[in-house]
Image: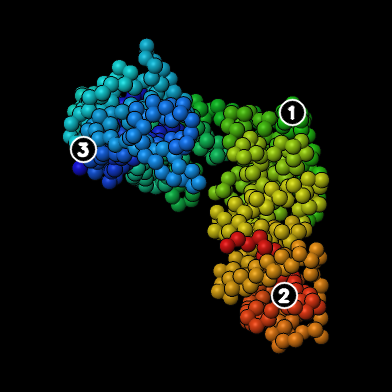
């Protein structure tokens, strides 16, 4: 068995593209190998700023012999069709096989091909992969036709310890690569992966992105600890910096403490966005520290002194700009900025951001009345000011700080703390890992901002379709759902949604299914079952029902009773269609002839009353538990009683009794929606 080593060496690959590129390389080569019958034991891909690498083990030296089969025309087809099939396969008529398929007989062409040497087949797979690689953005250079993310300099490809000889657009494959751009410029020649990885590390290149991240964290943490500081976690920045450096070296810098009067979010954003620096805080007090970690791509002869000094000068200029924005923005109140929103378009058909603010204010007052402890005037005030920081210089420079800066400016203007917090939190939750607002005013303003967006886009019929959701309406709905559920808000959404209520509730049901499936592992059909009762727009209540139903169908008694329900419903469906009538009235006990009928009737009456009372007090677990007591009487009824009796009146009465099973079980959900 043989090993395959592939490296595609180029100019710098953008950090944001690296992880996906490594995945695509592994996927495409894997599919190519499997497509030609070359099995392998393991396959892994790696990426650095200048190289994509793949390593596969357990490959055969020769492609296995293969037999290919093509289905042709029917044996009684026109002569022209048969001749065309023969021409395309290169076979004679007597070489075709005849097989009966269904009601007709067809010709089949079966051709055997001898396996080729694996190295020749692999070279073709690699060339196809390189030429068709799915870069988000690519370029051509020189006189060639190849498109790659950046100019491709070399291809290292070894199979079974020997270099493969092939060429792609003038770039010849071989056994050569290079190490670090500055610290190891000599040609490196290798024949297998272990030799390759060790040679790269000796040449100051860490092949594995995970190893580079670990090195950055270890060095940065040690530098911080030596100063009584700790690193502020930033996984996205760590991924990016690891993608910018082949031999990352962490260095500790500092900035003037005078800049600490600027909000820490501004300092951190300035450092991470423009300079890719890690921020630090005091390990004891937790306060933002006037220090930073910069990651260099080399080991400097002076220990990094000049690198640190250069970065400190650049950062001082950046922070001076940020402080200027901070000082200038505070010269104008948020309230005075409101008119500036008139010139900002929210949507061509929905007006300006100012128009949205006015809608938010009205909706905030209506919603505040439904949330206990929420002051309507404060909610409206927060909604009025929430977007005003969009006109500030700071948010113009750092859009990701919208809302956050609004809070600081509101506090500087003397606004109430809960109003300022609502301004900060009204975009939350921005994603699945983002926290939801938990105080009344922030809850109200965050909900109305999302609800107005949904209602407005529904009014102009701009709804998500398929995978397209340009206005992030699914995220907005999920945000509302999370706020409601995580805060246990008992709201009827229908009045708030107005004319769009029916369609929006269906959309929310879809989002709720996704949320409960991803967060709690709940089946989508159980959500359908509770929504199908109609008039259900209290999400907290719906989830309570769904959780009780989930527990019910997962228990043995519940599963058996569900099967009995389906049996009853199927009988009723058939007989109602045949008789052209509905059996949904009470059965007459005077017409019962068997003990099992009386027992089932009494059990249904008792259980239905108990379940209804439990549902009224929202104890759906107790309601479902009561239902399980029907299992015995229902089993006995189906075992001993003939529903479709010869006596017409007896048959009708027994069908009416079956309808009571259906009605009783649908106290908490529409069981017909449950799958399986």
Mark 3: secondary structure: loop
- Crowding at dot 2, Cα within 10 Å, few <14 / some 14-19 / many 20+, comes out as some
Residue at image mark 3 = 61
Dividing the picture into quarters, in which one does residue 336 lie? top right
Is 586 on the left or on the right of 115, as rendered?
right
Chain-order first, disc 1 or disc 2: 1
Chain-order first, disc 3 or disc 2: 3
For residue 644, the mark is: 2
> Which mark is nearer the camera, 3 or 2?
2
Q: Position of residue 343 (x, y in %)?
A: 74, 26
Give whichever of 163, 423 is nearer the camera: 163
Distance from disc 1 to disc 3, alpha carbons, whole Å, reads 63 Å
Q: Is residue 663 above or below residue 343?
A: below
Rendered residue at 72%/31% (across/down): 347
Residue at image mark 1 = 348
Q: Is residue 69 above or below residue 49?
A: below
For residue 154, the mark is: none
Q: Position of residue 194 (x, y in %)?
A: 21, 39
């Amino acid at each position: 068995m043989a090993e395959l080593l592939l490296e595609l060496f180029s100019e710098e690959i953008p950090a944001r593209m690296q992880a996906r590129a490594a995945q695509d390389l592994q996927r495409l080569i894997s599919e190519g190998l499997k497509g030609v019958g070359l099995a392998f034991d393991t396959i892994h891909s790696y990426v650095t700023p200048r190289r994509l690498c793949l390593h596969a083990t357990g490959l055969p030296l020769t492609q296995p012999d293969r037999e290919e089969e093509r289905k042709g025309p029917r044996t009684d087809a026109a002569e022209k069709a048969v001749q065309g099939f023969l021409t395309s396969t290169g076979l004679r008529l007597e070489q075709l096989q005849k097989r009966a398929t269904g009601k007709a007989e067809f010709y089949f062409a079966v051709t055997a091909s001898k396996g080729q040497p694996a190295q020749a087949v692999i070279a073709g797979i690699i060339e196809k992969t390189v030429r068709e690689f799915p870069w988000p953005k690519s370029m051509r250079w020189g006189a060639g036709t190849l498109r790659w993310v950046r100019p491709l300099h070399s291809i290292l490809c070894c199979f079974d310890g020997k270099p493969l000889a092939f060429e792609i657009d003038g770039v010849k494959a071989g056994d050569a690569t290079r190490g670090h751009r500055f610290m190891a410029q000599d040609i490196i020649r290798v024949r297998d992966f272990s030799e390759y990885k060790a040679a790269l590390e000796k040449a100051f290149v860490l092949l594995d992105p995970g190893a580079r991240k670990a090195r950055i964290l270890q060095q940065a943490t040690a530098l911080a600890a030596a100063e009584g500081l700790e690193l502020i976690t930033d996984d996205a920045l760590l991924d990016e910096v690891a993608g910018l450096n082949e031999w990352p070296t962490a260095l500790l810098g500092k900035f003037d403490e005078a800049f600490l009067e600027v909000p820490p979010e501004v300092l951190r954003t300035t450092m991470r966005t423009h300079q890719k620096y890690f921020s630090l805080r005091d390990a004891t007090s937790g306060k933002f520290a006037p220090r930073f970690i910069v990651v260099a791509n080399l080991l400097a002869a002076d220990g990094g002194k000049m690198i640190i000094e250069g970065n400190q000068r650049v950062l001082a200029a950046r922070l001076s700009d940020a402080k200027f924005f901070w000082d200038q923005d505070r010269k104008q109140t948020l309230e005075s900025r409101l008119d500036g929103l008139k010139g900002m378009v929210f949507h061509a058909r929905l007006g300006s951001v100012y128009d949205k603010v006015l809608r938010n204010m009205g909706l905030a007052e209506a919603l505040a009345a439904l949330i206990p402890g929420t002051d309507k005037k404060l909610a409206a005030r927060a909604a009025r000011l929430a977007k005003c920081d969009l006109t500030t210089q700071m948010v113009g420079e750092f859009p990701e700080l919208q809302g956050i800066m609004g809070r600081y400016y509101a506090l500087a203007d003397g606004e109430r703390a809960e109003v300022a917090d609502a301004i900060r939190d009204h975009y939350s939750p921005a994603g699945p890992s983002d926290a939801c607002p938990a105080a009344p005013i922030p809850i109200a303003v965050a909900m109305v901002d999302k609800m107005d967006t949904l209602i407005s886009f529904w009014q102009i019929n701009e709804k998500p379709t398929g995978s397209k959701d340009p206005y992030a309406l699914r995220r907005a709905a999920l945000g509302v759902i999370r706020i409601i559920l995580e805060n246990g808000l008992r709201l009827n959404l229908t009045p708030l949604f107005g004319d769009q209520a029916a369609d929006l509730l269906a959309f929310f049901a879809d989002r709720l299914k996704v949320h409960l499936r991803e967060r709690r592992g709940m089946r989508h059909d159980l959500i359908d079952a509770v929504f199908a009762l109609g008039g259900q727009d209290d999400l907290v209540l719906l989830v309570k029902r769904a959780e009780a139903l989930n527990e019910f169908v997962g228990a043995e008694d519940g599963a058996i009773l569900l099967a009995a329900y389906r049996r009853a419903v199927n009988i009723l469906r058939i007989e109602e269609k045949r008789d052209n009538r509905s059996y949904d009235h009470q059965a007459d006990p005077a017409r019962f002839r068997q003990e099992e009928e009386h027992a089932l009737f009494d059990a249904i009456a008792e259980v239905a009353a108990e379940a209804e009372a439990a549902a009224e007090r929202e104890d759906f677990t107790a309601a479902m538990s009561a239902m399980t007591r029907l299992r015995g009487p229902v089993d006995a009824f189906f075992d001993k009683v003939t529903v479709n009796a010869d006596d017409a009146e007896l048959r009708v009465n027994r069908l009416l009794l079956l309808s009571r099973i259906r009605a009783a079980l649908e106290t908490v959900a529409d069981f017909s929606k449950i799958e399986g």
